[in-house]
Amino acid sequence: LISIDGDGDAECVSVAKSCNWPHGSFTVYSHSTNLGLQKHIEWCTGQYDQADGIIILEDDLTASPWMLHYCAAVLEAYSGDEMIAQFSLYAPRVNEFTRIPFHPVCGPYDTYWAKVPSSWGQMYRPAAWQAYQEHSETSNNDQSRAPAQINAWSKSWKRDFFHYISATNKIVV
């Protein structure tokens, strides 16, 4: 599924429809109104049906040619782990709270665990996204657990997802 928010122009829709995808068929959906980022992500994740994973990429990213291999590998490696709320598809270069460079510790592992959600490129297992939605419907998003910078994000799905990770002790891979 390629979902275009806000009634994308004809060229954007044309490029999406002409995408060469050798892994099967796909649908291009162009929304007639602008949903906004949070509602668009919620709409996209609601379309998963029988999918093993839901990948969300922002439109200004360049994905690695190995991204789908990575996605398949982490889905398999962490298939039964309910502690994982999200798989990040990028590595931040700056700590969002201190504004200093971020470098994961080099070691023998391909991944690292974080307590901060990823917003530029992300993947969810349907069950993990469903758990987040159920929590969001019943939670008051206790903001006492979050750094002040996060609570200052007035319109941010990432803020709400951070509160979910914090309240449920989930992780991001």
Image (cartoon, helix red, strand yellow):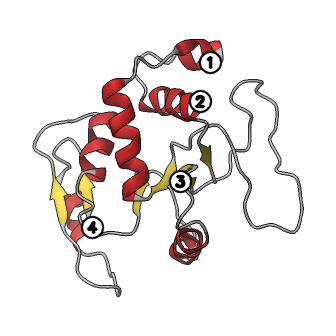
The alpha-carbon separation of the residues under discs 1 and 2 comes to: 7 Å
> Regarding mark 1 in the picture, which secondary structure is present there?
helix
Which residue in the structure is indicated by mark 2?
166
Looking at the picture, does residue 116 appear above or below residue 82? above
Tag 2: amino acid: Ser
Drawn side of residue 171 relative to residue 156, left or right: right
N-term mark: 2 or 3: 3
Marks 1 and 2 in Cβ contact (< 8 Å) = yes
Tag 3: amino acid: Glu
Tag 4: amino acid: Val
Q: Closer to the observer: label 3 or label 1?
A: 3
> Regarding mark 2 in the picture, which secondary structure is present there?
helix
Which residue in the structure is indicated by mark 3?
82
Drawn side of residue 116 relative to residue 79, left or right: right
Q: Nearer the viewer, residue 22 or 81?
A: 81
Which residue in the structure is indicated by mark 1?
145
Drawn side of residue 102 relative to residue 122, left or right: right
Q: Residue at x 72, y 61 (%)?
A: 111
Marks 4 and 3 in Cβ contact (< 8 Å) = no
